[in-house]
Image: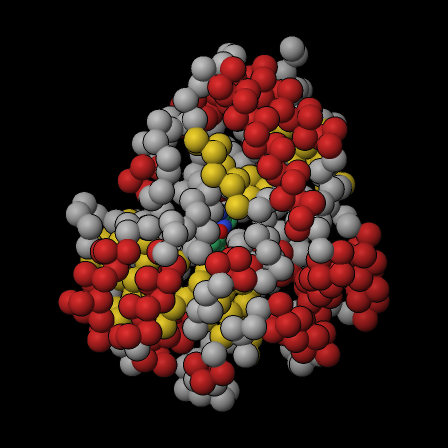
Amino acid sequence: MAPINREKSIKHFERARKSIPGGVNSPARAFGAVGGSPLIVDRGEGAYLYDIDGNQLIDYIGSWGPHILGHQYPAVQEALEKIIQKGTSFGAPTELETLLAEEVKNAIPSIDLVRMVNSGTEATMSAIRLARGFTGRDLIVKFAGCYHGHVDSLLVQAGSGALTLGTPSSPGIPKGCTADTIVLEYNDAELVKELFANKGDQIACVILEPVVGNMGCVPPEPGFLKAVQIECQQAGALLIFDEVMTGFRVAYGGAQELYGIRPDLTTLGKILGGGMPVGAYGGRKDVMETISPVGPVYQAGTLSGNPVAMACGLATLKTLKETNPYPALEEKAKKLVEGLSTASENAGIVHQIARVGSMFTLFFNENRVTNYTVSSKNNTERFARYFQGMLDRGCYLPCSQFEANFVSVAHSDADIEKTIQAAEEVMKEI
Ligand code: KE4
């Protein structure tokens, strides 16, 4: 079959590289792991992206998570067209911020108070500072393979061995920024218990993705989240669920609704903004009242709670609450991953598939992926061939094996069928 025409994208990307580092405003979009130039997108409509070469692509990235309703969902567009008549930003409180905060509290009962920021990174950075300020402790714990944004203290790669004091995974981060960051293996409750036995009274918080999306989709093993929560509670450390990706995705109340765990703090983003730049952190009243101006822990933001972004997020959350698309999303995503798995099996391709609700990853790996040690053994060369083959058949997947795919309300049965058909062909040639 004829590959899609990428001529204008390739040409424009060369122009972009002359003004923007690597031609992108976020490295995740650069096709670094799959080769070639990224497609330059002209517009999104429903389940589709249209690039500047006029290709229609079934979109399984959804802007890396926000577009659970699909692109240009009518109620969201209407809310945006209405709010823009009033202006864009005032640097003063608006009613919309309160309305969205109330909707977050309604969706996520563990949140008593919530502060809006402008990205998931800002949310996790603020939550970490708050946990340290509230507990008076310095040590923080994260898990290899979990990504929480480009926060200095969280850009840490696990060294060898199980219990590792973090070493920065990027130049520009002083060792002091990560000296108090401990990195453990996800889904290993024994390591968590061992750490808390040794250092529990020094630990400010544990931050984790309750369903990991950033090493590919990795669900928590039974009992893991509860074990972490018990260790935190016994030691007086805070449990932070980073639900930037899972919030309003795997359930309206996020992974904490799905697994019945109430963290002390939750970070949010992506769907919360409906495609506009919004992040948030919230949780226990006594903890959140440590944040300025009520308490001494400082955090601020010029555009935090921006009315345009609030309107977009509020329309998105109201639609999700009123329409409850989750059962249908579950069925649609289940059908898709079953088709992808059958296509892989028919071609004799060793693979694993992990799915929680409408987020999933097809791994080219011989073993079930439960942590980063296993995920790091993914066959990334095969993934690159799979990605390009699917793209040439009009299916736009996340451009890394270490990401999650997202199904939206807008994906039709025909889109799912077309995707499965494409996989049937591609798996035979990779
Ligand atoms: P942002 O700062 O990119 O809004 O959010 C950071 C973040 C925090 N926590 C989790 C669980 C996240 O997944 C993210 C961001 N996710 C990546 C993709 N997996 C965003 C894509 C990108 O960096 O361009």
Choose between 282 and 41: the one closer to the eye: 282
User: Residue at position x 55%, y 17% from top?
Assistant: 426
Choose between 74 and 209: the one closer to the eye: 209
Above or below for 106 versus 384:
below
Q: Is residue 425 left or right of residue 72?
A: left
Choose between 137 and 302: the one closer to the eye: 137
Residue 52 seen: no
Residue 389 locus on image (x, y percent): 56, 20
Screen quadrant of the N terminus: top right
Above or below for 31 versus 247:
above
Residue 223 locus on image (x, y percent): 36, 56
Residue 321 seen: yes
User: Residue at position x 33%, y 63% from top?
Assistant: 228
Residue 321 locus on image (x, y percent): 71, 61
Furthest toward the bottom, the residue is: 294
Q: Is residue 115 left or right of residue 351?
A: right
User: Residue at position x 50%, y 87% from top?
Assistant: 293
Residue 378 locus on image (x, y percent): 36, 30
Above or below for 286 versus 59:
below
Above or below for 114 versus 362:
below
Furthest toward the front, the residue is: 222
User: Residue at position x 57%, y 69% from top?
Assistant: 108
